[in-house]
Image: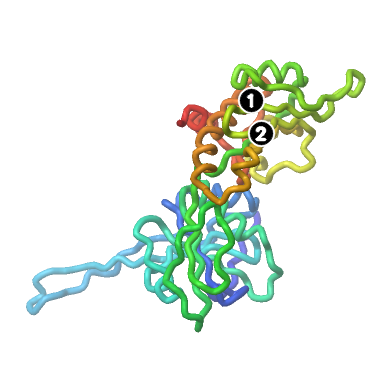
Amino acid sequence: MTATPSLPAVSPSAASSRATYLVVPQLAQLAPLARAWFPEAEWVVEPSRTSSRPAAVGARFRGLTSEATSQPGQLRLTWAAHLEGPVEAGELEAAGLDPVAKGVVLRLCVAPGSPADPRLLAWLRAAARRSGGSVLHGAVPGVPSPRSAPGVSGFGAAPAEAASVERAEPESAVELAVYSAVPVAPEVTLGLVRAVVPSARILSAPGPDEGIAPYVLALPTQFDGTVELRFSRAGELPVCLLELDWREYGPFAYRATWQPPFEMSSTTDDSLSRVARARVRPLVARVIFSIQRAAGGAVVDEDGFVLSHDELVARAVSM
């Protein structure tokens, strides 16, 4: 039996003077999302809500009242960082941010002197997009700034000093991958995906004497660029697969990536990309569904989270 060490007491933002928060619809989602990136993640202290002992009120003790108090929890991400919360609205206001109307807010806490870990902010953004939440950045103390900046589409860089809100768009996650123990020949894969995209073709394939080797298929669309399906042996497996039984995935990866048309990538009008993504997203899901049906394995989205069968089907039929 091993004991879970207690987390060090740290300031709201030990690594810098800029506080960072994650907003999620509900706490129940957080631990699985954290373990998808950090295998040791767990609730070290469970958040709870307790009621104080009833107290007499009124001139002649006409009634008894009890006040509920929230006990913040601590969700360990790494041995040097954890999330703490839910936090109160007053803390957000002190950081130059508006109170959150819906959802639960947790503060990122990093142990003093620990090395910078770029995974932390990357995971906050990924978890926010997966759950439909957001990432909040408090203002640097002493620097005048608006209470919150406009929402950042697609998680662009936040202002250096002003308080800001990065609102996640779950629909912006398009790309998917299947990790399987079964290698499917490019000719067979082409037949599978042509049921979804009849114009699909092989871009590159191994020779007859090369055995199992990488190949690439192109799945062009009429208006929205091209989806590329790349097969190869995975150099590294996503951490999220460690949560599964080893028989549920394998070392071969089928990755579906989206290449927008040139004119779309060169414009600043994000509305065009948003419309194209909405059309390509279910197409990618249908392609991956056809691959998984033939090769088995586990589906992982571009944020490093496993998609269940129901989630994949829901994405495939969405419009």
Q: Residue at x 60, y 75 (%)?
A: 16
Q: Residue 56 or 260: which is nearer the viewer?
A: 260
Residue 185: assigned label = none
* Label 1: how many Cα within 10 Å (few below 14, some 14–19, many 20+): many
3D distance between C-alphas at marks 2 and 1: 12 Å
Q: Is residue 28 left or right of residue 114?
A: left
Asked whether the viewer can see residue 300, the reply is no
Which of discs 2 and 1 lies nearer the camera? The answer is: 2
Q: Residue 24 or 263: which is nearer the viewer?
A: 263
Q: Position of residue 194 (x, y in %)?
A: 64, 18
Residue denoted by label 1: 292
Q: Residue at x 58, y 67 (%)?
A: 6
| Quadrant housing the N terminus | bottom right
Asked whether the viewer can see residue 158, the reply is yes
The image shows residue 64, relative to residue 3, as above or below, that is below
Q: Position of residue 155 (x, y in %)?
A: 55, 55
